[in-house]
């Protein structure tokens, strides 16, 4: 479904992504593991069209998308929930849902049906639908960010550090939500510092170091890999 080949990305004159290869198959969860600064967020932004690439290709369902504008990529079925949520403090929950639907991929659900769906997933958002995003708790804001992405009717949902700054009970709820989304057939590309959680959710994983993929395997195998245990699980 998503195929990345020999991808390179620069910041200024400095190359920060060095010829990586990666794929996400239909309906699977894939996680990217790596320390801060390894290049994970840079890669996600390249997929969604925010960061321009300097070499290689990004194919989505057989179509080259690496030169498309971000809104065109959204309309093809890829939604990116960014690190830090990036909500508008003075917009309501419902206004964020409306914004997420502007470039929605063609699908069977109407706008009203999608709203009902995200309210079913996140009942608290229905209760707070007219509340300003800036007045919500951190966990509620993260739910708004995910709901905004889902309103685009994606086939692939990109999640960048969804549990950042959240309380343990909220993280547990969010983990259950990711599993529920996966059961609907949605493919998910996940970046998450809680490596044990990410690998428990994913079917496959890639390990990033300084802009390169140094290890790729099934999630279960990565959980047992001594290199992963030592570097990311504290074992």
Image (tube, helix red, strand yellow):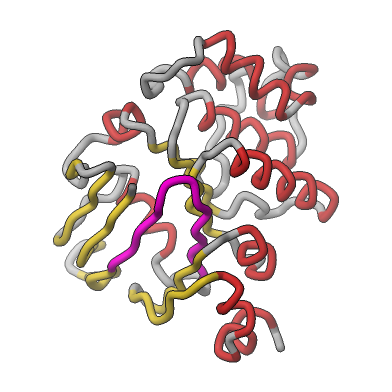
Location of residue 156 (image quadrant): top left
| Location of residue 126 with respect to 83 vertically, above or below | above
**In the image: residue 80, left or right of residue 211:** right
Does residue 139 show up magenta in the picture? no
| Location of residue 65 with respect to 91 vertically, above or below | below
Q: Residue at 62%, 41% (x, y): give it.
A: 183
Nearer to us in this view, 203 or 5 = 203
Residue 152 in the image: state x and y as whole percent.
46, 25
Does residue 29 show up magenta in the picture? yes
**In the image: residue 178, left or right of residue 55:** right
Q: Residue furthest right?
A: 169
Q: Quadrant of the C terminus?
A: bottom right
Nearer to us in this view, 216 or 164 = 216
Q: Residue at 28%, 69% (x, y): give it.
A: 20
**In the image: residue 62, left or right of residue 162:** left
Q: How many marks?
A: 0
Location of residue 227 (image quadrant): bottom right
| Location of residue 86 with respect to 47 vertically, above or below | above
Nearer to us in this view, 38 or 47 = 47
Residue 60 in the image: state x and y as whole percent.
27, 44
Residues drawn in magenta: 21-33
Residue 215 in the image: state x and y as whole percent.
43, 80
Q: Residue at 41%, 17% (x, y): give it.
A: 102
Residue 144 in the image: state x and y as whole percent.
63, 30
Q: Residue at 23%, 52% (x, y): give it.
A: 58
Majority secondary structure of magenta residues? strand
């Amino acid at each position: 479904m998503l195929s990345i080949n020999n991808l390179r990305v620069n910041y200024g004159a400095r190359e920060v992504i060095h010829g990586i290869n990666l794929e996400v198959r239909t309906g699977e969860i894939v996680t990217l593991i790596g320390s801060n600064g390894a290049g994970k967020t840079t890669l996600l932004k390249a997929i969604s069209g925010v960061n321009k690439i300097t070499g290689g290709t990004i194919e989505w369902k057989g179509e080259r998308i690496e030169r498309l504008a971000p809104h065109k990529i959204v309309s093809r079925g890829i939604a990116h929930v960014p690190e830090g949520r990036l909500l508008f403090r003075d917009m309501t929950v419902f206004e964020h849902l409306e914004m997420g639907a502007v470039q929605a991929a063609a699908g069977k659900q109407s706008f009203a049906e999608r709203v009902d769906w995200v309210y079913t997933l996140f009942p608290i958002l229905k209760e707070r639908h007219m509340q300003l995003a800036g007045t919500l708790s951190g966990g509620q804001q993260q739910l708004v960010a995910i709901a905004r992405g889902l309103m685009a009717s994606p086939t692939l949902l990109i999640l960048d550090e969804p549990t950042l700054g959240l309380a343990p009970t909220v993280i547990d709820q969010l983990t259950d939500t990711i599993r529920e989304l996966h059961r609907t057939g949605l493919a998910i590309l996940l970046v998450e510092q809680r490596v044990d959680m990410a690998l428990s959710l994913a079917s496959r994983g890639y390990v990033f170091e300084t802009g390169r993929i140094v290890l790729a395997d099934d999630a279960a195998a990565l959980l047992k890999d001594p290199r992963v245990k030592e570097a990311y699980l504290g074992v």
